[in-house]
Image: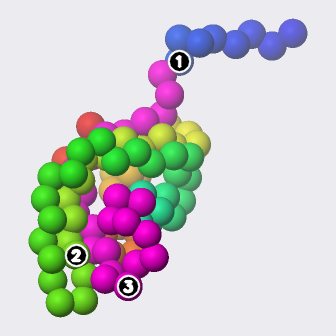
Amino acid sequence: MAITSDNDPEPTTTAVVTIRIPCSADSDIVTDAEERLSRAEGIDAVTIDKLRSLDPKLSATVVTVGITLRWTTAMTDAEVRCRLADVPGLESIERIR
């Protein structure tokens, strides 16, 4: 019989990121940001916790958001940065916790 524990923390990360959302996006800014961030390898779920800033540009809106990411496995901060770096439109990662 396998022994399981509910005491193990979920592999989650909180961060502040800036991402570019094209003006031609089909959904609202928050939904599109969640969809784009969920493309990172190993992401189980993305939640936008706080909209920090909006900077409308000619062809896109640059959005800074506080996020919570739930991963399929635990990762180091360096692995998180590496996975997020592949997200289309991601401009910066300000803070990871």
- The 10 Å Cα crowd at callout 1, few under 14, some 14 to 19, many 20 or more, is few
- The 10 Å Cα crowd at callout 2, few under 14, some 14 to 19, many 20 or more, is some
* Range drawn in magenta: 9-31
Magenta highlight on residue 8: no
Q: Amino acid at mark 3?
A: Ser
Place of residue 95 in the rendered image (x, y in percent of width and height, measured from the top left): 19, 47
Residue drawn at (30%, 42%) of the image: 49
In this rendering, the label closer to the viewer, 1 or 2? 2
Place of residue 85 in the rendered image (x, y in percent of width and height, measured from the top left): 35, 67
Query: Within the image, what quadrant is residue 61 found in?
Result: bottom left
Residue marked by disc 2: 61
How much space separates mark 2 and mark 3, taking CA atoms?
10 Å
Residue marked by disc 1: 8
Place of residue 31 in the rendered image (x, y in percent of width and height, measured from the top left): 42, 60
Q: Work out whether mark 1 precedes mark 2 in sequence or the reverse, and give the earlier one.
A: 1
Marks 1 and 2: CB-CB under 8 Å? no
How much space separates mark 1 and mark 2, taking CA atoms?
38 Å
Residue marked by disc 3: 24
Quick check: 63 above or below 23? above
Query: Within the image, what quadrant is residue 77 found in?
Result: top left
Q: Secondary structure at mark 3?
A: loop
Q: Work out whether mark 3 precedes mark 1 in sequence or the reverse, and give the earlier one.
A: 1
